[in-house]
Amino acid sequence: MAGIGSALITASAGYFLIDQFNNSIIQGNRLSIDDQVVKISLTLVASGTTLMLLSKKHVNTTKNWRLRLVNIY
């Protein structure tokens, strides 16, 4: 889940940058921010961050003890 989360964050940054490149260089317009692109990028960042936070495998209990969650198949 952490890998997918980081991939979503990277994809959202890439999507936003590619849209800015397309708008300014390819189409010849000034730099402008499209609302739909920002909404999609922020949704991808939020989803990726949520997946990264949920994939935490350590639970801190006290100063010297820590639980580790292990999946056994």
Image (cartoon, rainbow, N blue to C red):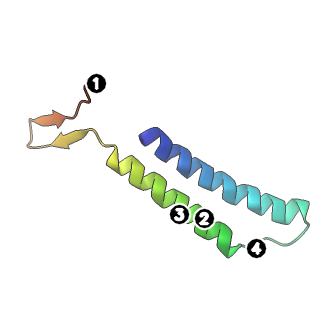
Q: Could you tell me if the residues under marks 2 and 3 are in contact, i.e. CB atoms within 8 Å?
A: yes
Q: Which amino acid does label 4 sit on?
A: Ser
Residue 32 is labelled as: 4
Mark positioned earlier in the residue sequence (2 or 1): 2
Q: Horizontal and vertical percent for residue 60?
A: 16, 43
Q: What residue type is labelled 2?
A: Ile
User: Which residue, given by chain and number where applicable, does mark 1 sit on?
Assistant: 73
Q: Which of marks 2 and 1 is in front?
A: 1
Q: Horizontal and vertical percent for residue 6?
A: 50, 45
Q: How crowded is mark 1: few (under 14 residues within 10 Å), some or many (20 or more)?
A: few
User: Which residue, given by chain and number where applicable, does mark 3 sit on?
Assistant: 43
Residue under the image location 43 percent in, 54 percent down: 49
Cα separation between marks 4 and 1 = 50 Å
Cα separation between marks 2 and 4 = 16 Å
Residue under the image location 71 percent in, 73 percent down: 34
Secondary structure of residue under mark 2? helix
43 lies left or right of 53 = right
Q: What residue type is labelled 1?
A: Tyr
Secondary structure of residue under mark 4? loop
Q: Residues within 10 Å of mark 2 (few under 14, many from 20)?
A: some
Mark positioned earlier in the residue sequence (4 or 1): 4
> Residue reaching furthest front?
73
Residue under the image location 62 percent in, 68 percent down: 38
Q: Nearer the viewer, mark 1 or mark 3?
A: 1
Cα separation between marks 2 and 3 = 5 Å
Q: Horizontal and vertical percent for residue 7?
A: 55, 44
